[in-house]
Amino acid sequence: MIKIIKQFTRISLVIILFSSCAKVFYSPDAYTLAHKHKSIAILPPEVTITVKKKVDEKALKEQQKIESLNFQKELYAWLLKRKSKGKPFPEIVDIETTNAKLKKAGYPEKPLSPAELCEVLGVDGILISNFDLSKPLSEKTAVVVGLLSGMYGPTNEVRVSLSIFDKSKQKQIWNYNHRMSGGITTTPHRLVDALMKDASKKMPYMK
């Protein structure tokens, strides 16, 4: 019996992702503009956690901030690793520098357009992302007990949107929309890894 339990535990720790077909948009000049980018920055993702029951709003917002920073770090690490392997990609501003400049500019409390954000960060383009979660992924750092006790769905359904904005033309040149779902052991690291294995191949930098 103990052996069976151990085997089940190992299996439960393996993320299983089921995904629908991603929807991808390219502007007519996406590749031309993307190949002119010498540097880009990854904005803190906008994260929404959808819960079924009423929870403390302040605590929920704090959890969303935690998830946002985790996703930002994972996206940065993933793309940096790909770049280190010789894959074509612009220089990526490190997360600490990006967030320090944003904080100094008063963002996100002070609304800024994508073009203004590029100016603040001193980059040619920015990666904007949105994650809509059915439950928190960083359970070890969850700040709302109710979020970890059945107030969300049994699986991690995640809706993701990634966009690249070009400073020179002041417009979105690429967008990737995807819906994914997995077991309760999904983490930001595993989700971003599964996501970017597909999304990165479709970025205009890669062709």
Image: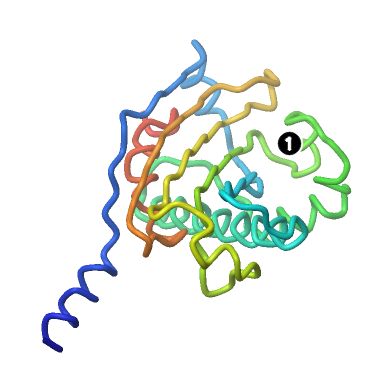
**Residue 141 vertical placement versus 71 (above, below):** below
Drawn side of residue 150 relative to residue 142, left or right: left
Quarter of the image where the N terminus is located? bottom left
**Residue 32 vertical placement versus 142 (above, below):** above
Q: Residue at the spot x=58%, y=40% of the render?
A: 130
Residue at the outermost front position: 53
Work out whether residue 54 or residue 141 is closer to the camera in this orientation and state it. Answer: 54
Drawn side of residue 114 relative to residue 66, left or right: right
Q: Amino acid at mark 1?
A: Cys
Q: Residue at the spot x=52%, y=66% of the render?
A: 138
Residue 102 drawn at (x, y percent) = 79, 50
Work out whether residue 162 or residue 39 is closer to the camera in this orientation and state it. Answer: 162
Element carrying mark 1: helix
Residue 142 drawn at (x, y percent) = 59, 69
Residue 173 drawn at (x, y percent) = 55, 22
How many numbered discs, if any?
1
Residue 95 drawn at (x, y percent) = 64, 58
Q: Residue at the spot x=75%, y=44% of the render?
A: 121
Render colour scheme: rainbow
Say few, some or many: other residues with alpha carbon within 10 Å of mark 1 (under 14 / 14 to 19 / 20 or more). Answer: many
Quarter of the image where the C terminus is located? top left
Q: Quadrant of residue 179?
A: top left
Q: Residue at the spot x=65%, y=20% of the render?
A: 171
Residue receiving disc 1: 118
